[in-house]
Every structure is written in C-alpha cells, then in structure tokens.
Amino acid sequence: MTTTHQLLLGDEAVALGALHAGLSGVYAYPGTPSTEITEYIQDHPLARERGVHSRWCTNEKTAMEAALGMSYAGKRALVCMKHVGMNVCADAFVNSAITGVNGGLVVLAADDPSMHSSQNEQDSRFYGKFAMIPIFEPSDQQEAYDMMPAAFALSERLRLPVLFRIVTRLAHSRASVTVGSAANENALRPDDDRTHWVLLPGNAKRQYASLIAKQPDIENAAAHSIYNNTEWATQGGGTGVVACGIGYNYVREAAPVGISLLKVSQYPLPAQQIRDMAAQCKEILVVEDGQPFAEEQVRAMLGADYPVKGRLTGDLPRTGELNPDNVARAFGQENCPAFPPAVNLAARPPQLCQGCGHRDVYAALNKVVADYPEARIFGDIGCYTLGALPPFRAIDSCVDMGASITMAKGAADAGLYPAIAVIGDSTFTHSGMTGLLDAVNAGSDITVIISDNLTTAMTGGQDSAGTHKYEAICLALGVEREHLHVVTPLAKNMEEITRILRQEIDYHGVSVIIPQRDCIQAYARKKRQQKS
C-alpha cells in the first residue's frame, strides 16, 4: 500500500480516515470543535468524485437518524457533533444500539473540556457506556486517522454503532499523519430483517437481550485492542498510570522516567490489564481529559482499600483541560517554571462584529424595554449570545439550543410580562420551531425575535437550514399574519423597528419579528469571491 504524509488537524485526520474507510455519507450539525470534520469532507476531491453525502443537517437528531438510515441501506455513515449535540440526538443514539446497524455507523462526539466554546464540560464517554457500545478515543492525530477504519470494521462485525470521542485540543491541533489509500464504498444492501428495526416491545426485548449478549465480545475487543497497551517499569512497586486518550501524551511528556503506564484508547476499560497493574504498583493515577469516567470504574474494579488517584482525589484538577504542567504536578514535580500573572492588561471580552445586524437588534430592543421595567429577554445559542456582554447586556438567560422560546413561554405562563425571546435563524430550525408551536397552541403572551443573518455564523458561515423560509415556517406554525414582521436591522430603520417592537409587546399573544440582514463576515467573503 502506498503511503504519504500529510499535516492534519485532528478533525481532518478523522475525516480523511473516514473517507479512506469507504465512507458514503457524513451527517452533522456544525458545532465547535467538530465542524471541520464535515467541512474537510465537503471539500475533499475523493468525496466529490464518489458523491459522498455531506450536506449539513437541521440538528443532531436528524443527523443521527439519517445516518442510521444509510446504515440500514448497507453503507458506511459518520455522524459528527460537539458533545452537547449528543443530548439532542440521544433518543436515536441510544435506540440505535437496540436496533443495531447494517453498514458501519460511527458517531463522533467532540468534547470541550475547559468550555472554550460550550456551556458545559460533559464527557461523551458516559453516553457510550449508557448505550453499551464500543468507544474509541484516539491519543493523537495518527490514531484519529488509523482508528476510523477499525471503528467501521468493528461496527460491522458486532452490528452495533461505535462512539468515537475526541477533545478540543486534539481536534484543533496539527501533526504529521501517515495516510494510505482509500477502500471502496460498501455496495447497496438494505437489511431484509425487519424484526430488529421495528422496536415494538416484543422485538425490542429480543434486541436488548442480543445487546447484552454482545457485551463479552465488546469487552474482548477492547482487551485485545492494539490501542490499549501497557509499558512496564523496570522495577515494580511505584505509581502506575492509566492514561486515556490525549492524556497519554501529557503523561509521556511530564511523568518521571520508569513508571508503569497503561494507555487506553478503546473501551470498555481493559479490566485484566488494570488488575495486573494494580498487582505490580502501590497506587494508580488515572489521567483522563474530561470527567472521572475511568477513575470511577478503576476504583470499583480494585476496591476501596486500593489507592486510586486522579480528579476525584484532587491530584489532578477537577475541572478543565489537562496539560503537561498539571499532570507533572500530580507526580510532585514542576514541568516548567511558573510565570507571574500579566499586569496592566485590559480585559478584551469577545464582541459582536462591527456592522453586525444583531447589534442593531439589541440597540432597538434595549431602547424599547427601558419602558417595561419588568421585561425579561430570554436568549439562545449563537454569536448573538454575545448580547449578554457589554455594551448591550441585553439578554437574561441562555441555557441550550432552542430554550429561548420555551423559557419565554414558561415565564409568560407564570405571569411574567413582557416575556421576549431572541433566537438565531439556524437555532430556530434546529430546535426552536416546536417551542413556537407550543406557544401558538397555548396563545402565549410572548414576543419572539428571530435574528436572521442568513447563515450559521458562529461556527464559520455554514448553510442555515431555513434560509428564506422563516416567514413561511412561522405562518405554517400558526403565527397570525398581522403579528409577523420582517425588518432590516439598520440604524436608519431604528424608528420603524422600535415601533414594531412596542406594538407587538403590547399585543397579548404570540408575535414574531424577523430582523433579516446578511452576516457581515459572510457578506464580505461573498464579495471577495465575486471579485476573484
């Protein structure tokens, strides 16, 4: 096999590994740090040559279900999302372990320790354990590439989906990767056995029993995986280390020479290797980027009397990313000299771009709600969330995708007035439409602002599923025509926008205002492309 070397982001290594594994479709909703996987596939010549499906989905649930449909047809499919997207697709994801798969199905979850661009630090490995399926967690870009064919092959051998977990530091760093040639796609071969796809209780019970019966095979695959291996110290009795995924690199850089080290990149945890290490070492340190997923299990395996250290004991930080420095400190040493904190530097919090249409929306909203002292503005996930920061300080909540409309509805149900929701265009089609339907059906006293910049701006300008369809969607959901307005957020239109805002706040029912203007960054890119 001919090999070449390429300098790849972790995301790109995942994408190329999937393409070279014979991928037929990638299904995703953009979310940092996973976005570049789908973008790489969309731009790759092999994907274009083969017609690999790579269009963005409306949300992670539709992505998971579409990928399951491609698997049903016998083809290999990849689903990509950031960690909180796992919450959105959980229904389909967990049930896919019950139905099983036909063509290989890999679910990529990109976790974000330290919350660089996220609202929580959840660890997607818990989802894999909950669904009782295999989990892969590469330690570097080379493994991210190499593991993709292995994950698809295991998926097809066990007829189960496989969870593939990466973290921000791996997703967004580059390394030289040795790559091979591409395998052929699977032939179209739809599954003829309906019994495990139709989850009526009788079928589901049999399928669940089948999933339980596969657990020894899943455990055996991890126990004999080339990605799980022990490096023994020349002398026993010291500290042993269980290093998971990217944590392995931090240990190799920061740990003292001569430790026993078990590298784990495929789950379930290799129990016998862990017990063997415990028999040779006086204690075990568990190094994992994320929550104490492995640490809790190692403690359970070895019993309360055996010392297991890690995040739960405070030997490693309980929150945030690991790095060589805090791993070194867990061994009682400093990896590098400490630097004093910077002084006389002004804080530079992120801000909405100059010329952004969201700015004019918030300027108008702040002007109007000043006349309503009890007003509350429920925000949502997108670049417009920056409206919570100075100079606007315009939103009072931001919880999860789509929550603005439903939280406004609930607050209005409680008697709060006025209750205003601000949601972006892509977020509205992702998970805001059902909330608006609830509000219409209940006749809720809320004002909804769908701030439409004609793209999915926060993640780099991907297509937004409902572009130029938002009026039609709102009307179809039951919003009254006279209480649905489209405006252009510009300073010259401020008088009109504020008038409409006051008018609809004073209306005691569901009203929707759609400020619509191109994202300034996307508009600039479009103009540059037109000139070139």
Image (cartoon, rainbow, N blue to C red):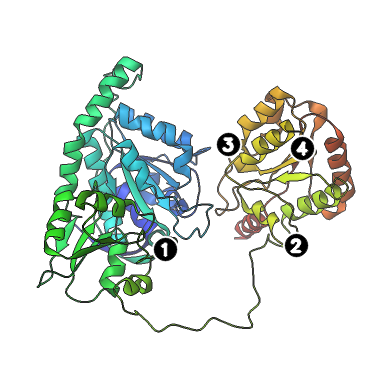
Mark earlier in primary sequence (4, 1): 1
Q: Are marks 3 and 4 in contact (CB under 8 Å)?
A: no
- The image quarter containing residue 356 is bottom right
In three-dimensional space, the C-alpha distance between marks 4 and 1, rounded to whole angstroms, equals 40 Å
In three-dimensional space, the C-alpha distance between marks 2 and 4, rounded to whole angstroms, equals 25 Å
Crowding near the residue tagged with mark 4, few <14, some 14–19, many ≥20 C-alpha atoms within 10 Å: some
Residue located 17% across and 65% down the image: 282
Q: Which residue is mark 3?
A: 431
Q: Which residue is mark 1?
A: 321
239 with respect to 329 (left or right) = left
Relative to 415, say whether 1 is above or below.
below
78 with respect to 156 (left or right) = right
Residue 192 at x, y percent in the picture: 27, 19
Q: Which residue is mark 2?
A: 391
Relative to 263, say whether 462 is above or below.
above
Residue 71 at x, y percent in the picture: 33, 32
Q: Amino acid at mark 4?
A: Leu
Mark earlier in primary sequence (2, 1): 1
Residue located 25% across and 20% down the image: 206
Q: Between tags 2 and 4, which lies in front?
A: 4
Q: Which residue is mark 4?
A: 416
